[in-house]
Image (cartoon, helix red, strand yellow):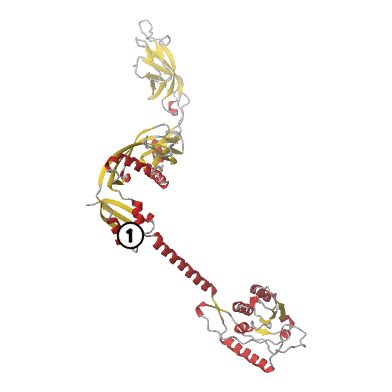
């Protein structure tokens, strides 16, 4: 071997395995001696040792570790890595420890190097060190070195048989670990939901009940902060939604947007009576109609003496008036001297026109009523949808929505450009403000309690269902300050006075049979039905919020 194929590299104690491999790769030599410091942490791992061995094999290099640490020798032997005590020692492959065969499914293949080093030469000679006179033999006797050489040869033969040592697949192991942890978390969450979140109980109590229909009239006021029993006024909250929507549609109408011919007309009255021709009178020539711009009064006809009796062309019975063509078009540009009849005055009143000029035609697209209707139909404004949105908004804030107060104001619709205006499209814009009033449900219940006081038998009975879900709300009047007078009609259910909060506390955590017994002994209770959900729940939840109590009239 020549010195050009050998190199010696000194490794720092802080070098990572990637840095060591980079140093080895940067060498052009075929034989690389890596001089390791004491406690070289990067090579204390079998994985890193195999990575170094594989990197050397892939680069076509023979790597020799220069170290005397006993802890590294078994790792090097397991990988088939050459080791020497110093640069003046001969390289050997240490004995490999006996390890169980790795699971083939979780290993990665590493290509081995079938070309052994010349173990008759020292590392210094292999690495190109010219000072080979100070060769230091290993502490073992030559026989031991020979045994090591045989061991190396034996390892070499074994390497030829199994060239692909196995490396544990840590990525797969980590994936399995994460999946296992995730599964445990999901199970814990499912257990928590099943035990603490999902359980519900519905207790249906059947009692001797009666119903009563009541009308309550009260005032809602956005400026009030508390219920006023004396004036029957409750605080209110207004939900408001302003809607601004616009849609367009192409213009499809057609219109002649040209100009109208104009001129003047000399009218002669040849009748025996004076006449007044009002403004807007139609005069026609050649089936084309013009309209007088002003009114004109003419004396009775003036005739020449007999014989002949011809109506004169001048005098107070003759006058001139301006006229405008009824429609656009150049066909109205009539020549001077054309004769005209005057609508409504017979043949005794006639006219002679000047030259009619300025008439032209131009057919253009204009906005039609059909176009306006098409754009309006596309407006996405639905009163029922907005009413539902306002109701949900109030309920989300803890209010009872008085749906009968739903109203809209400041409603307007604009069309741009207007009907019959020249355009390529029309835009219809709609704006309106919608409102709904909400009140505290507790305040309504107080009002209803006051209205049925005489039927509660001095506290022995109570209102078990206020019927608010089916109540009818009517607005009687609205004041400028925002107050409203409301009439609420509802049917209430009256039954035994049962303290629901105390009952929930008594049955919390009890089994079905215990719950039924506790409820049945209450005054006025005829029967009880206990329903648990989901299906695995066998006792009443401990949280009162998860218990629903309903009252029904016993058969």
Look at 64% across and 73% down and name the residue there.
Answer: 18
Question: Is residue 543 visible to us here?
Answer: yes
Look at 37% across and 5% down and name the residue there.
Answer: 305
Which of the 4 image quarters holds residue 64?
Answer: bottom right
As drawn, is 155 to the left or to the right of 297? right
As drawn, is 520 to the left or to the right of 358? left
Residue 503: x and y in percent read 33, 54
For the residue pair 368 and 535, the one nearer the viewer reads as 535
Which of the 4 image quarters holds residue 211?
Answer: top left
Which of the 4 image quarters holds residue 541?
Answer: bottom left
Q: Determine whether 370 is above or below 169 in the image.
A: above
Question: Is residue 1 visible to us here?
Answer: no
For the residue pair 63 and 229, the one nearer the viewer reads as 229
Label 1: state its secondary structure: strand
Q: Determine whether 246 is above or below 287 in the image.
A: below
Residue 169: x and y in percent read 54, 75
Residue 521: x and y in percent read 27, 55
Q: Residues within 10 Å of mark 1 (few under 14, many from 20)?
A: some
For the residue pair 152 and 498, the one nearer the viewer reads as 498
Please identify the residue farthest to the bottom as the structure is shown. 143
Look at 40% across and 34% down and name the residue there.
Answer: 483
For the residue pair 38 and 361, the one nearer the viewer reads as 38
On-image quarter of the N terminus: bottom right
Residue 32: x and y in percent read 69, 80
Q: Determine whether 426 is above or below 461 in the image.
A: above
Look at 63% across and 92% down and name the residue there.
Answer: 150
The number of discs equals 1
Which residue is denoted by mark 1 in the rendering? 532
Please identify the residue farthest to the top as the structure is shown. 305
As drawn, is 284 to the left or to the right of 519? right
């Amino acid at each position: 071997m020549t010195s050009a194929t050998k190199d010696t590299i000194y490794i720092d104690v802080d070098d990572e395995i990637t840095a060591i491999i980079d140093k080895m790769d940067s060498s052009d030599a075929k034989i690389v001696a890596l001089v390791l410091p004491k406690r070289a942490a990067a090579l204390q791992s079998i994985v890193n040792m195999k990575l170094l061995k594989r990197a050397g094999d892939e680069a076509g290099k023979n790597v020799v570790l220069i170290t005397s640490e006993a802890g590294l020798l078994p790792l090097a032997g397991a990988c088939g890595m050459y080791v020497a005590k110093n640069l003046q020692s001969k390289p050997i492959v240490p004995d490999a420890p006996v390890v169980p065969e790795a699971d083939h499914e979780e290993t990665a293949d590493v290509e081995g190097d079938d070309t052994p080093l010349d173990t008759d030469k020292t590392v210094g000679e292999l690495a190109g060190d010219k000072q080979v006179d100070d060769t230091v033999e290993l502490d073992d006797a030559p026989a031991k070195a020979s045994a090591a050489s045989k061991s190396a040869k034996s390892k070499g033969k074994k390497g030829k048989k199994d060239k692909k040592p196995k490396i544990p697949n840590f990525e797969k192991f980590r994936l399995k670990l994460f999946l296992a942890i995730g599964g445990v978390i999901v199970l814990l969450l499912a257990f928590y939901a099943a035990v603490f979140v999902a359980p519900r109980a519905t207790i249906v109590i059947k009692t001797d009940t009666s119903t009563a229909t009541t009308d309550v009239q009260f005032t809602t006021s956005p400026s009030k902060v508390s219920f006023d029993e004396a004036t029957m006024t409750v605080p209110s909250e207004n939900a408001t939604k302003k809607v601004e929507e616009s849609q367009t549609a192409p213009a499809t109408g057609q219109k002649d947007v040209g100009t109208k011919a104009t001129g003047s007309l000399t009218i002669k009255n040849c009748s025996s009576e004076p006449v007044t021709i009002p403004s807007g009178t139609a005069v026609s020539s050649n089936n084309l109609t013009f309209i007088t711009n002003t009114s004109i009064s003419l004396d009775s006809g003036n005739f020449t003496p007999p014989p002949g009796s011809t109506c004169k062309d001048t005098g107070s019975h003759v006058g001139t008036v301006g006229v405008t063509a009824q429609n656009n078009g150049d066909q109205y540009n009539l020549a001077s001297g054309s004769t005209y009849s005057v609508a409504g005055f017979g043949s005794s009143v006639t006219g002679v026109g000047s030259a009619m000029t300025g008439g032209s035609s131009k057919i253009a697209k204009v906005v039609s009523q059909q176009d306006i209707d098409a754009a309006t139909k596309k407006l996405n404004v639905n009163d029922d949808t907005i009413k539902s949105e306002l109701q949900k908004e109030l309920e989300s804030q803890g209010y009872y929505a008085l749906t009968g107060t739903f109203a809209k104001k400041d409603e307007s619709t604009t069309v741009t450009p207007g009907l019959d205006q020249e355009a390529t499209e029309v835009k219809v814009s709609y704006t309106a403000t919608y409102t709904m009033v909400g009140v505290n449900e507790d305040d309504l219940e107080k009002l209803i309690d006051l209205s049925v006081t005489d039927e509660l038998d001095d506290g022995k009975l109570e209102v078990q269902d206020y019927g608010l879900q089916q109540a009818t709300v009517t607005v009687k009047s609205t004041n400028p300050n925002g107050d409203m007078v409301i009439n609420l009609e509802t049917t209430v259910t009256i039954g035994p006075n049962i303290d629901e909060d105390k009952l929930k506390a008594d049955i919390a955590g009890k089994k079905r049979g215990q719950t039924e017994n506790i409820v049945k002994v209450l005054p006025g209770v005829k029967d009880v039905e206990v329903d648990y959900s989901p299906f695995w729940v066998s006792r009443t939840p401990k949280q009162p919020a998860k218990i629903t109590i309903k009252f029904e009239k016993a058969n």
